[in-house]
Amino acid sequence: MGSSGTPDQPLRVAIVGSGPSGFYAAGHLLKSKSHPDLNIQVDVYDRLPTPWGLVRGGVAPDHPNIKAVSRVYEKTAAHPEFRFYGNVEYGRDVTHEDLHARYHAVIYAVGAQTDRRMGIPGEDLPGSWAATEFVAWYNGHPDYRELEFDLSSERAIVIGNGNVAADVARMLALTREELAQTDVADHALDVLAESGIKEIVVLGRRGPAQVAFTNPELLELGEMTDADVVVDPRDIEVDPLSRRWLESEAASAAARKNVDILTGYAGRAPAGRRRRIVLRFMVSPLELLGEDHVEGIRICRNELREQDGGLRACSTDTIEELGCGIVFRSIGYRGTPLEGLPFEERRGTIPNEGGRILDEQGGPLRGDYVVGWIKRGPTGIIGTNKRDAQETVDVVLADLDAGRLNDPADPSRETLEELLAERAPDHVTYTGWEAIDSVEKAAGEPHGRPRVKLTRTEELLEAARARALGVKPARPRARRPKRPAPAPGKPRCR
Ligand SMILES: Cc1cc2nc3c(=O)[nH]c(=O)nc-3n(C[C@H](O)[C@H](O)[C@H](O)COP(=O)(O)OP(=O)(O)OC[C@H]3O[C@@H](n4cnc5c(N)ncnc54)[C@H](O)[C@@H]3O)c2cc1C
């Protein structure tokens, strides 16, 4: 081998997953500065009929400017040697063996498909949800559209102090008019707009200096049209350990700014808006209470202790109970294993070195690479995946130069398409996605919405097929906005 990437034999690369990391990897490969004359073909797969991963299915609907990053990916997709195969699932429709028989390199960009659990009693009661489920539901992910969220109680609890927790709190507090300007899934619009929730309590296990919100997300909570942000001044007193850390060079400017923002919130008098977002710190959930449904939560007060070079939250004997009807845990996403590949259970990632997947002995698996959240864990913003993808693409191209890529038996596009026609006859090409995109945008346009999402796989496939057959697909109907304690034990440190 070693002759791929030449005029006679294009370098064939498969990317499994069409979220930011997959698309950045495709873009870097198709426009490689180090290999400007490379003859390359890039095929991107996704288990959904639609591309963009969490940009479509995670980023909050009221953040259209962030969703607009997809324009960058559209430019990559316009490259003549790019192909999209949506509605094709790795592990179900295509296997490791199938891809290795057809590609010189496979890059896995599957993200983190599940969430971390709290591991406390009552976690499985009805009314206890993973933020992942709620987010996927309001963003119209087909696998989650049938979920039913009961928002009739007065208080919701959100556990976690990161941006996803902030998104969940905001989505619970937006007004109908605000929601109706977004691409929130229609099935979620009415449920959210008619919610009876008056108070959203966001619980953080550590103090204001340690929150993981970015500054803009925290600021947004203080700018809601119809919700007051409430912080108890006693709750944000910075403890001596955190104070010392904030004054040291180790503290980031963002952490200092977060403390300033929260101090500002603590000095605000509520303006009597319809809802309240209450930010609480130094508390951890111990148990969700209720017989057949969540009726409350038992929490304990924490204190910070220095441990293993960091500040850990350790439980104290001070216990409190709060009534609530729904709980969202937002304590992190988690990757899941993929057929034919090693998996690092503890971190929920695929073991790798700079993007090269490692086998159990720690040696590189020939032709297998990884990028994005499944490579480094569920951290970082969309832009983080751009740098990350560059690192992975650099090792793919270094392995090309060194003759260390996979040697596929049949690297032709024609036989691949034959395989897909047999295994995944309903696959969606990029043209099919463009048809879906235009149907959704056209349905949103009369209502001043960016799009009205198709949320059933069948509807998505029908819209994709209609273009191929020259048929006018049915438009999704847009909704018009209507008028308006456990025994104290040994401290647990996390
Ligand atoms: C709720 C939420 C909100 C966020 N908001 C922001 C924000 O406002 N701003 C920001 O900068 N960042 C935000 N992020 C972070 C950002 O979304 C991630 O950094 C980014 O999406 C990670 O990219 P990825 O490609 O690794 O994974 P993903 O975006 O998850 O993409 C993975 C893709 O792989 C596909 N896939 C999975 N398994 C298979 C399989 N077996 N076969 C084929 N395809 C498969 C999935 O369908 C998906 O399309 C947010 C994250 C979340 C969870």
Image (tube, grey):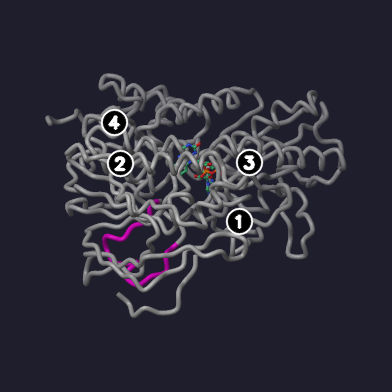
Q: Nearer the viewer, residue 412 or 206?
A: 206
Distance from Cα at disc 3 to Cα at disc 1: 17 Å
- Label 3: state its secondary structure: strand
Identify which residue is drawn at 70% across, 38% down.
Answer: 13
| Nearest to viewer (mark 3 / mark 1) | 1
Determine which residue is flagged by label 3. 15
- Label 1: state its secondary structure: loop
Label pair 3/4, CB-CB below 8 angstroms: no
Q: Nearer the viewer, residue 334 or 434?
A: 334
Q: Amino acid at mark 4?
A: Pro
Distance from Cα at disc 3 to Cα at disc 4: 31 Å
| Nearest to viewer (mark 2 / mark 3) | 2
Residue 202 lies, in percent from the top left, at: 33, 52
- Prevailing secondary structure of the magenta residues: loop
Q: Is residue 325 shown in magenta?
A: no
Distance from Cα at disc 1 to Cα at disc 4: 37 Å
